[in-house]
Image (spheres, coloured by chain):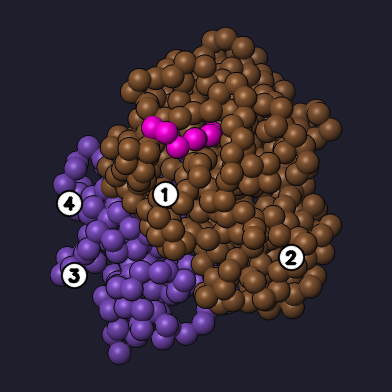
Chain colours: A purple, B brown
Amino acid sequence: MKVVFDSFDGSSNIPARNYVRKKKMVKYFSRLSAAAMVSFGKLANGITLTPDMPIYYATGPLTHGETSYFHEMCDIFLSSSEPFSNKIFIERALPKMSPLHEFGALYNMPVCFISIEYGLVGDNASLCCGAAALLEQAKHSVYRGNIILGAGKLYSDGKIESAFAALTKAELNSIPQFSWDEDAIELFRVLEKEKAL
Amino acid sequence: MSRVFITATGVASPLGSSFSEVMEGIEKGAKGLANIKSFDTSYFPISFAGEVKANGEVIKTDSSIDRKALFLEIALEQILSTSILDRYDPTERFASLGTGIDYFDLPNYINETVALGAPAPWGKYVKCSISAAKDLTKRLELAGGCIINATACVASSQAIGLAFRKLKQDGMGVALTGGYDSMIAPLHYMGFYRLGALSTWTGAPQDACKPFDKNRCGMVLGEGAALYCLEPEATARQEEILAEVVGYSSTMDAYLVTDPDPEGKYLAKAALEAIHGAGLSPEDIDCVHLHGTGTYKNAISESNAMKIVFGKRGPEIPVFSLKGQTGHLVGACGALELMGVIYSLRNQCVPPTVNFKTPDPKVPLNVIKDKPLCMNIRNILKLNSAFGGQNTALVVRRYE
């Protein structure tokens, strides 16, 4: 089993650019996607990836996501001191909204970018769930070889934790049960501790 | 390994909020797309959508309401009326649901921001997509857990696929599965507009989504929820069985974040894996219910995938897309479109694809138009693809 666990504080630069060959893709990355690319890049270094290897990834809510354009939109309403109106929204605030906004809101983007960068074409799922759900998804995979599990967590102060592991089915089945309320990232904290022992 | 059956449905859709309304809507070729009525769209450069209707009227909500959570409740009520979940111990009940991106109440957030003179607390105006499902898990005592899939446009078909795998492998329990989603609100609706993803049609709204047509001009957003009970052979009651799920697979294009692979290689791979997983060969598939978004690139990708899967039969096998009638339900599209599959199995016909008028020589598909094609249908292939390159294939069989 190989496990990678990364943590990036809210102000840190996430060096995703160092982990992608297709540099143009970086413009689509949210901070969570950038963190996933870094962690997956470290995981991929030293293991053999096969195109059919399944990847299952879970995060919590993305609602603390990228908001810089949002502040610009708000500033427009604040400067006018007027409540929400379609006229201001469409004519003045909307042009401030990046066309790339939705890439930060879609839960499947980290897996999408990893798939493109590493040529993964197999079974997959992007979950908005905890550790138990991620394990349930993986345990019912029909693939017989190694499986990749990943998780990301975005904190309200901008901190991001990101982790990936490559496991055999036997390793997967030996993981202790998690409660349905535990964040997916906690699975990787446990796996990393086990690896260190 | 157990057989897995669909035994109950619940729905809230642009064709209506009951199973019978959806069946009737498909039969009549009802057009569920119109100008948006659920919120004010004055000044919006575009305002087409498939909004959920109940008793023939669009359901209107205050901007503080996350519509997808409401639609989940409407569909759930129909499932609960069957009492199927009650027949199982809480430890045997689980949910596997697909959904979309989190809701944000932009108008009220802006209003509080202006009142405060500074950005308002963010979290108060966010409704996380999983909140409704978490609440449902507690209320229904789903002690077997709740798995929420958020893989964009294949979220609900992946959720159904996981429920199928679990019941097939475990042979016990009951799954509440399907999807719920709505992006018909100012922020995400205009977000998709800014992305250039929406139909550029300028005519009548009901004609805005034209899957596979030569003059197709993009997708139209829809909204809704479609839920199912899936049960294994050991406990499903014969008289309640609507159809049998027999195969599932999911793949990724690994191509571009914005476009499907034009060759459709991995969409075809998903289809073949699902067909073979069901113990079938492509010759056993009678018709295909495609993703059919109404975009130029989707049609190219799907028609090429059909050539790979079916060979010479690719341009001949009858195909259908529901999206001309409902719009694109994103995180719930696969689940709603499974009702189209059930329609075909029950009525032994492939419905016409609404708004398909002019064939495109670059899209050599047998899209049924104008009137249904009546035929013997035993096995249907259902395909979906996501923004981001994920694909799903389900094979669904008439109950015998």
Amino acid type of the residue that numbered disc 3 sits on in the rendered structure: Ile
- Comparing labels 2 and 4, the label whose residue is closer to the camera: 2
- Please report, as a chain letter, where disc 2 is located: B
Mark 1 on the same chain as mark 3: no
Mark 3 on the same chain as mark 4: yes
Q: Answer few, some or many: residues within 10 Å of disc 3's Cα (few below 14, many 20 plus, some between 14 and 19).
A: few
Amino acid type of the residue that numbered disc 2 sits on in the rendered structure: Gln
The residue under label 1 is B283
Image: B244 above or below B123 = below
The residue under label 2 is B238
- Comparing labels 3 and 4, the label whose residue is closer to the camera: 3
Mark 3 falls on what kind of element? loop
Amino acid type of the residue that numbered disc 4 sits on in the rendered structure: Asn
Marks 1 and 2 sit apart, C-alpha to C-alpha, by: 28 Å
The residue under label 4 is A18
Mark 1 falls on what kind of element? helix
Region of the chain picked out in magenta, as a range: B315-321
Mark 4 on the same chain as mark 1: no
Amino acid type of the residue that numbered disc 1 sits on in the rendered structure: Glu
The residue under label 3 is A47
Q: Is residue B317 magenta?
A: yes
Marks 3 and 4 sit apart, C-alpha to C-alpha, by: 18 Å
Q: Residue at x 53, y 60 (%)?
A: B246
